[in-house]
Image: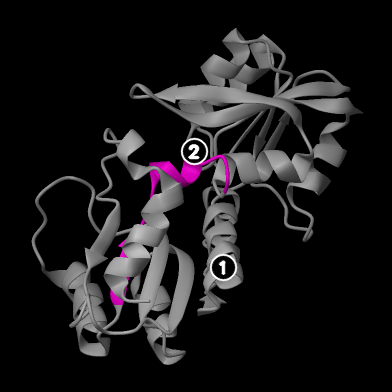
Amino acid sequence: MTLHQLDDYFRSFLNMEHYRGDPSLNGIQVENSQPEGKEIRKVAFAVDACQETISRAAAVGADLLFVHHGFFWGQCQTITGAHYQRIRQLLEKDMALYACHIPLDANELVGNNYGLARRLELQDLRPFGDWHGMTIGVGGTFPAPATLDSLVQRLFPGGERPLHLLPFGKKEISTVAIVSGGAARELSQAIEQGYDAFVTGEIGHEQYHQAMEAGINVVAGGHYQTETVGVSLVMEKLARETGIDIVFIQVPTGL
């Protein structure tokens, strides 16, 4: 498949047109030299477009780097400093860059939030989390109440540890709201809607007292850790449906 054919493929299920309020410039952010002709043989996947992921993608011969956090966020930006070095690497290696931000958080098939909900085996899934007029998260119910420890174990089956736990809610958790990444402010919506637990990537100082006073459990799993889910699911789908060679580039930030 060429770059433009892959763009059509990704757009066929990522529903980018539904999230026009996203400041990220979703889709192709940097072309290759022949977007309608050069065959994409290997696609690298990563959470962030940074010098390390670009260098490692180039080292394994990737023709395209697919990321959750790209270069461009809706504002003019000079091509200088680290920004220039990142783009220079891509152009020198003739490697394209593709980004998908909010659409990948919210997608029911391959998104971060629904992916986390499926890890937890939640049922009765429903949209949750209004952000700038867009619903980006998901809420659901356990088939049988779970403890906070078992919730964390299901959330991170590889043994990863969350950044922070605020165990201020019920010992037996029935309902969970999820918004990956930096969604501390959506805690208020989880409280208003009566959820037993809120899962996100990172929280701030002010959420400690908010959660304690409301009596809700909060899992801050890490911005990075909660957002490896979507890119991994897109990667698996691409490999399964097209046979294109894929590689995941793990660059954890610990944040």
Q: Which residues are magenta?
A: 96-109
Residue 202 locus on image (x, y percent): 54, 40
Report the residue at 56% width, 50% height from top: 110
Residue that mark 2 sits on = 106
Q: Point out the image quarter for the N terminus.
A: bottom left
Q: Which residue is mark 1?
A: 241
**Residue 160 rendering spot, x and y as whole percentages:** 73, 57
Residue 29 drawn at (x, y percent): 24, 62
User: In the displayed structure, does residue 241 sit left or right of residue 121?
Assistant: left
Name the one closer to the observer, 243 or 218.
243
Amino acid at dot 1: Glu
**Mark earlier in primary sequence (2, 1):** 2
Is residue 145 shown above or below 63?
A: above
Q: Quadrant of residue 90?
A: bottom left
Of residues 145 and 252, the one nearer the viewer is 145
Kind of residue at disc 2: Ala
Q: Tell me the residue at 26%/62% (across/down).
A: 28
Callout 1 crowding tier (Cα within 10 Å): few <14, some 14–19, many ≥20:
few
